[in-house]
Amino acid sequence: MPAMIMDGRAVAGRIKEEAAARAQRLAGAGIIPHLAVVLVGEDPASQVYVRNKENACRKAGIRSTVIRLPEDCGQDALVRTICELNADEGVHGILVQLPLPEDMDEQAILRLIDPDKDVDGFHPMNVGRLASGQSGFVPCTPLGVMRMLEAYDIAVEGKHAVVIGRSHIVGKPMAMLLLNESATVTVCHSKTKNLAEITRQADILVAAVGRAGFVTADMVKPGAVVVDVGINRVDGVLTGDVTPEAAQKAGYLTPVPGGVGQMTIAMLLHNTLDAAQRRGK
Ligand code: NAP
């Protein structure tokens, strides 16, 4: 039997509705939630991502401001911008669109963001909070995956979860979230040996590699929950990391497009509202 396709649009749609209601309540209390997005350079994909974030904010009643800096602005200009946003009481969330130009120190920039405005959850303080099970901002994509599992009543406790990928943005926080929910977690990466042997043991398999068709049907345990985080463009067509054939083996599968990608923006709204709410207290 083919897998149940997990509808990211529907789940994210519900989260966006909740976000709009929350934004309205905050506005009623005199707080206009405000997200500042800093975009350096003209990367076409980044421009699209930022536009999508702006649109989602507008629909939810969240104010968004995009600060555009030229590619060659230099790190000092970016540092100044972040310091101004940190100091601005009217700004609740700050997001620096990645990747930054190669001559900039990404980690140093992310460390500058006030951890209480760090709605992407990349600041070491928030990474540490997640690792030690304390509340803080969690990166939007893995947080969205957890909400998707929850929406489909997929229990995590006691399951063997295998995460392919160990980036700061997806793989590591994903593993941490699953571990915090008492899954037994294996993290795989490019140096992992016998990858397919490991993935075949997964009750929950998360693919965050960035290679089209990387996860083939023979790597999937029958009935497993397969979460496809990958976003790849093949001949102009958007595709994930998991081959369509894997859908015949999996019990549940997130599609690309229409899966995790939808959840990422919804969770950005959620994090921004959390930031506004905390400031309002
Ligand atoms: P990344 O930083 O490039 O990380 C990719 C990971 O895959 C690395 O940990 C790498 O291992 C691992 N990998 C590469 N080749 C492998 C192999 N042959 N076997 C096993 N592991 C391998 O990418 P990312 O930022 O985590 O993103 C991953 C994918 O998710 C991309 O397609 C990205 O576009 C997508 N994404 C989607 C969303 C969304 O909203 N849906 C959000 C963020 C990212 P090493 O560490 O050993 O190099």
Image: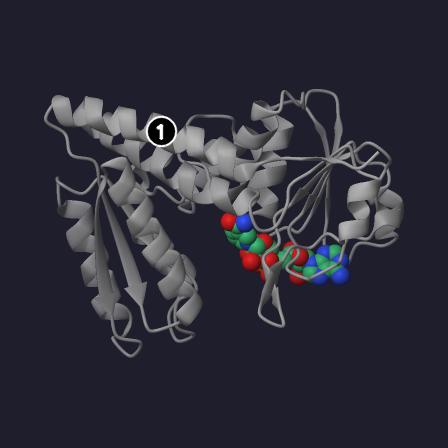
- Position of 140 with respect to 30 (left or right) is right
- Pointer 1 residue Cβ closer than 8 Å to ligand 1: no
Circle 1 residue: 17
What kind of residue is marked 1? Glu
Nearer to me, 219 or 16:
16
Which residue lies most toward the front here?
Answer: 1
The residue positioned 63% from the left and 72% from the top of the image is 235
Count of numbered tags: 1
- Position of 136 with respect to 38 (left or right) is right
The secondary element bearing badge 1 is classed as helix
**Residue 238: percent from left, percent from top:** 59, 60
Whether residue 113 is visible, yes or no, is: no
Rendering quadrant holding ligand 1: bottom right
Nearer to me, 52 or 100:
52
The residue positioned 69% from the left and 55% from the top of the image is 241
The residue positioned 30% from the left and 37% from the top of the image is 272
- Position of 207 with respect to 180 (left or right) is right
**Residue 123: percent from left, percent from top:** 40, 46
Colour mode of the rendering: one colour
The image quadrant where one finds the N terminus is: top right
278 in relation to 244, above or below: above
- Position of 42 with respect to 69 (left or right) is right
Whether residue 8 is visible, yes or no, is: yes
